[in-house]
């Protein structure tokens, strides 16, 4: 039977992630509570389902339970950004993906203490779970995950983490989507629809700025919005909004200061997501622009649900 290498060397860190020493896997997992870093990747598909891996019975922690799609320790001398693609390739056979950093936190149990770096991605390609490291894996619906919570099927770490970072947001978006579907049903005036859509999003999600820009006379013109005063005209291909229009795709910006040509309507904006509103022929008719005062606010969950909301909007 396979088993973990208890002599494998891990970095020991403080709660900010600064390396302050090193210890073996055995030393980190024997109740010493030495804080050591790990990376987790939550993999969603286009339908919003989430992939879980099955931990093999030979694992020294939580054997036989379903867990986050990818989870692995940092090697000594390795950064989270270096460890993540290595673990994803080793465990799922995925070599090309775009991760979004969600946050980090300290996980504690009787046996160990981990500094967890949380990422997510949307992936619709082939997944090949490692036959050496896993007992397989599959996509789970949100309903299946909720039903399995507390039934000893999922690892406690996954349950707490998914509840904290994803389920609460998913539930808010689910209710928001139902509200917007009711608000827009039968309404043919696009300005009225956009006004209620951005008001509902803004009130439910608590973003800094939420609004629409309409394509008019070869530029983006400010439409209904919630929040501080904003730029009224944006050119094709300019800033995040103009780029989303040009590329005809959603753009997620973790740090607006790192986006080339970013248009700063407000110095308080730190991260941004822009979602195109498309005609039946795939032409961009408007964009939904949302800003946050915090870095790295938006992820693939926001992308998934906001794209769905924009598909409800019928432009006139």
Image (tube, rainbow, N blue to C red):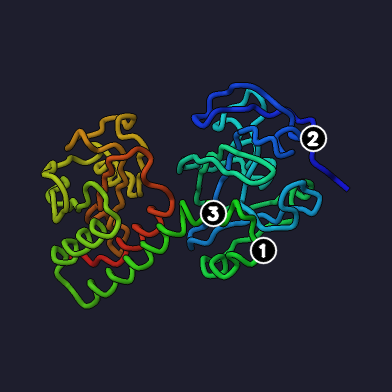
Residue located 61% across and 33% down the image:
35
Of marks 3 and 1, which one's residue comes earlier in the chain? Answer: 1
The answer for how far apart the CA atoms under marks 3 and 1 are is 13 Å
Going from the N terminus, do you reach mark 2 or mark 3 first? 2
Residue 152, labelled with which disc? 1
Which circle marks residue 6 in the picture? 2
| Image location (x, y in percent) of residue 139 | 60, 61
Does dot 3 land on a helix, a strand or a loop? helix
Q: Label 2: few (<14), some or many (≥20) within 10 Å?
A: few
- Within 10 Å of disc 3 (Cα), the crowding (few <14, some 14-19, many 20+) is some
Q: Quadrant of residue 266?
A: top left
**Residue found 64% across the figure and 27% down from its top:** 11
User: Position of 255 compared to 126: left or right?
Assistant: left
> In this figure, which residue is indicated by the disc labeled 3?
160
| Residue 104 to residue 151: above or below | above
**Rendering coords of residue 1 (x, y %):** 88, 48
Q: Is residue 283 above or below residue 193?
A: above
N-terminal label among 2 and 1 = 2
User: How far is mark 2 from mark 1, CA to CA?
Assistant: 26 Å
Residue placed at 74% from the left, 29% from the top? 24
């Amino acid at each position: 039977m396979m088993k973990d290498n208890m002599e494998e060397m891990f970095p020991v860190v403080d709660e900010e992630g600064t390396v302050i020493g090193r210890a073996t896997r055995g030393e980190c997992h024997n109740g010493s509570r030495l804080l050591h870093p790990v990376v987790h990747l939550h993999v969603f598909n286009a339908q919003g389902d989430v992939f879980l891996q099955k931990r093999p019975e030979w694992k020294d922690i939580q054997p036989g339970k379903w867990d986050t799609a990818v989870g692995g320790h940092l090697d000594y001398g390795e950064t989270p950004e270096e460890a993540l693609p290595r673990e994803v390739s080793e465990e799922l056979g995925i070599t090309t993906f775009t991760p979004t950093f969600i946050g980090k936190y300290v996980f504690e149990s009787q046996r160990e203490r981990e500094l967890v770096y949380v990422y997510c991605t949307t992936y619709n390609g082939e997944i090949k779970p490692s036959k050496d490291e896993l007992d397989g894996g599959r996509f789970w619906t949100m309903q299946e995950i909720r039903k399995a919570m507390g039934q000893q099927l999922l690892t406690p770490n996954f349950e707490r983490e998914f509840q904290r970072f994803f389920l609460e947001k998913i539930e808010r978006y689910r209710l928001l989507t139902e509200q917007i579907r009711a608000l827009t049903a039968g309404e043919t005036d696009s300005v009225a629809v956009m006004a209620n859509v951005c008001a509902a999003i803004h009130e439910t999600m608590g973003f800094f700025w939420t609004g629409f820009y309409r394509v008019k006379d070869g530029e983006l013109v400010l439409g209904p919005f919630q929040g501080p005063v904003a730029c009224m005209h944006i050119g094709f291909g300019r800033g995040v909004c103009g780029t989303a229009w040009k590329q005809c795709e959603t753009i997620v910006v973790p740090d607006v200061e790192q986006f080339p040509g970013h248009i700063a309507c407000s110095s308080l904006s730190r991260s941004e997501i822009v979602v195109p509103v498309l005609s039946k022929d795939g032409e961009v008719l408007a964009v939904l622009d949302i800003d946050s005062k915090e870095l790295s606010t938006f992820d693939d969950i926001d992308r998934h649900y906001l794209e769905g909301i924009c598909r409800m909007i019928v432009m006139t």
